[in-house]
Amino acid sequence: MMAALHPTHGASPPGIAMDSTEEELIAACPVELQAIIEQFQQSTPRERLELLLEFANDLPELPARLHGARDAMEQVHECQSPVFLHTELVEASGESAAAGGREVQLYFDIPREAPTIRGYASVLLAGLAHATPEAVLATPEAAYMLLGLHEAITPQRLRGLHALMVYIKRQIRKLNEIEKREARSERPADGDPS
């Protein structure tokens, strides 16, 4: 196990600080994602591709309400295949439910002919299940490196994997901002007798 996570081509990838250790980066991930990372790290690069294919096969279909609403989904243009993402903040049903918190719900529309990005999306879906927006935002954007995928797939495909997490975080930030704006507009103004 390496002490610090360094990319293979010199510069630090976005979302990874050069002085962060691999252990610190893994600790920043939700527990479910940490377990998946451990599973991938214990595998050879070839086995990682097989695991990724298993995850690709497990990616659920879109719910009926999103099937015809691709225009409500954001396309991840950096991916080689057509990848669409929809993120929602919902009332928590996991551990954060007792605290009355919110959790991130992810939806992906990715063709079966794109097993690499489909598998990674499924890893994120499973690893970020019931995670709060704050937990997802704290997850390293280059989680694919923690999985060891940089040793198994091409740099061009890695850009798509990286972009997927960037888009997820951007959508969460946008949803957080909308919720804050709505909460401010619902508050009575100072001096309002209501």
Image (cartoon, rainbow, N blue to C red):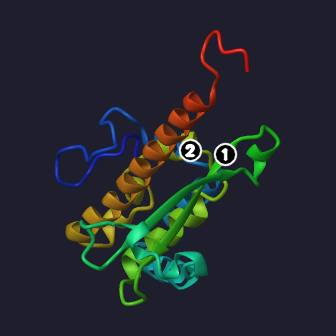
Amino acid type of the residue that numbered disc 2 sits on in the rendered structure = Pro
User: Which tag, 1 or 2, sits closer to the chain's start?
Assistant: 1
Relative side of 180 to 11, left or right: right
Residue 102 is tagged as: 1
| Rendered image quadrant of residue 82 | bottom left
State whether residue 56 is above or below residue 150: below
Q: Is residue 64 visible?
A: yes
Task: Give whichever of 185, 42 is nearer the camera.
Answer: 185
State whether residue 177 is above or below residue 41: above
- Which element type, helix, strand or loop, lies under badge 2? helix
Relative side of 143 to 136, left or right: left
In this view, the residue farthest toward the front is 193
Residue, disc 2? 133
Quadrant (top left, top right, bottom left, bottom right) of the C terminus: top right
Residue 12 locus on image (x, y percent): 24, 43
Amino acid type of the residue that numbered disc 1 sits on in the rendered structure = Arg
Neighbour class for label 1 at 10 Å: few (<14), some, many (≥20)?
many
In this view, the residue farthest toward the left is 10
Residue 36 is tagged as: none
Q: Gap in Å between the C-alphas at discs 1 and 2?
A: 7 Å
Residue 26 locus on image (x, y percent): 51, 46
| Rendered image quadrant of residue 114 | bottom left
- Which element type, helix, strand or loop, lies under badge 1? strand
Residue at coordinates 53% horizontally, 77% vertically from top-left? 55
Residue at coordinates 54% horizontally, 34% vertically from top-left? 180
Task: Give whichever of 38, 97 is nearer the camera.
Answer: 97
In this view, the residue farthest toward the right is 98
Residue at coordinates 77% horizontally, 40% vertically from top-left? 100
Give yes or no for contact between labels 1 and 2 (Cβ–Cβ under 8 Å): yes
